[in-house]
Image (cartoon, helix red, strand yellow):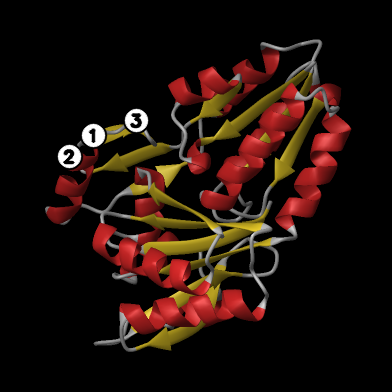
Amino acid sequence: MVRIITDSSTLYTVEEGKKMGVDILPLCVTVGELEGRDCHMDMDAFYGEIAKGNNPSSSQPPVGEVMEAYEQYPEDEIINIAMADGLSGTYQSACGAKVSVDNADNITVFNTETLCGPHRYMLEKAVQMRDEGKTAKEIIEWLEYAKAHQKSFLIPQDFKFLRRGGRLTPMAATFASVLNLRAIMTQTPDGCRLDKYGMKRSMKLAFKAVVDHLEEVKVDARYKIYVSHARALDDAKKAIAMLEERFPGVEIELLDLGAAFVTQGGPKCVAIQYIEK
């Protein structure tokens, strides 16, 4: 039997994962006096701590929890679909847990090289394939294809969260926020860090630049688009309206970012991502 494990980059809770037959291992988040697990925190309290000037931090799921998840299924094929290596220690931690358990030969830790929307889609498709009776090898082959056919853009409102998180290329690290300009960030080709894509004078123009890119690469009904935000619903809706106008008939899903990813992108950030279905 194929067992699927993943982390909260998928923006699914532990309970939602159970309904899918999936083990969700949430990242850990701390801000001020508040400690909790990603996708399970009181988000009003979380944003409240940031408003007080407290800087949030996140870390991978505890390695002991990952080992316990592996050890639940000693006879089964396990696929751990992990968020991008480099943007979190989650992948490396999952690999470390693998070599520490007796059933290591039955475990594949898969680096999606992405996070949030495309990661969520990869999980959903893997679950569908599992339920259809596909083998672990067949699921992994599709995951390899999927990670080569997805891309993410992040438009932060407060660049200091990205600088502090250390997930930027050296060039992007000097790409500090400039008055009245909006930075557009995208992942490096290996998915490990964020690099600058461009700068625009407004969120609207930043969205347009991303939408223009989607048009250039011929995104159509074969793809799914995700728009995720950190309490920037009005901006997210404007991005969706622009996408719907340019790409009629393409599936678009709106998501609220969890605490771990607000920690990376900062409050009011908006992400636009796409993946081939």
Name the foreground residue: 21 vs 165: 21
Name the foreground residue: 155 vs 70: 155
Q: Residue furthest left?
A: 52
Q: Position of residue 43 (x, y in %)?
A: 24, 40
Q: Viewed as shown, does residue 109 lie left or right of 10?
A: right
How far apart marks 2 and 1 lie (CA) works out to 5 Å
Q: Viewed as shown, does residue 99 lie left or right of 159?
A: right
Q: Residue at x 38, y 60 (%)?
A: 265
Q: Which residue is mark 3?
A: 40
The N terminus lies in which quarter of the figure?
top right
Q: How busy is the neighbourhood of tag 1: few (under 14 within 10 Å), some, or many (20 plus)?
A: some
Q: Residue at x 44, y 29 (%)?
A: 13
Q: Which mark is residue 45?
A: 2
SS label for mark 2: helix
Q: Position of residue 120 (x, y in %)?
A: 56, 43
SS label for mark 1: loop
How far apart marks 1 and 3 lie (CA) works out to 7 Å
Q: Position of residue 211 (x, y in %)?
A: 50, 76
Position of residue 217 relative to residue 129, above or below, is below
Position of residue 141 relative to residue 35, above or below, is below
Name the foreground residue: 244 vs 162: 244
How far apart marks 2 and 3 lie (CA) works out to 12 Å
Callout 3 amino acid: His
Marks 3 and 2: in contact by CB < 8 Å? no
Marks 1 and 2: in contact by CB < 8 Å? yes
Q: Residue at x 73, y 41 (%)?
A: 110
Q: How many marks?
A: 3
SS label for mark 3: loop
Q: Which mark is residue 42?
A: 1
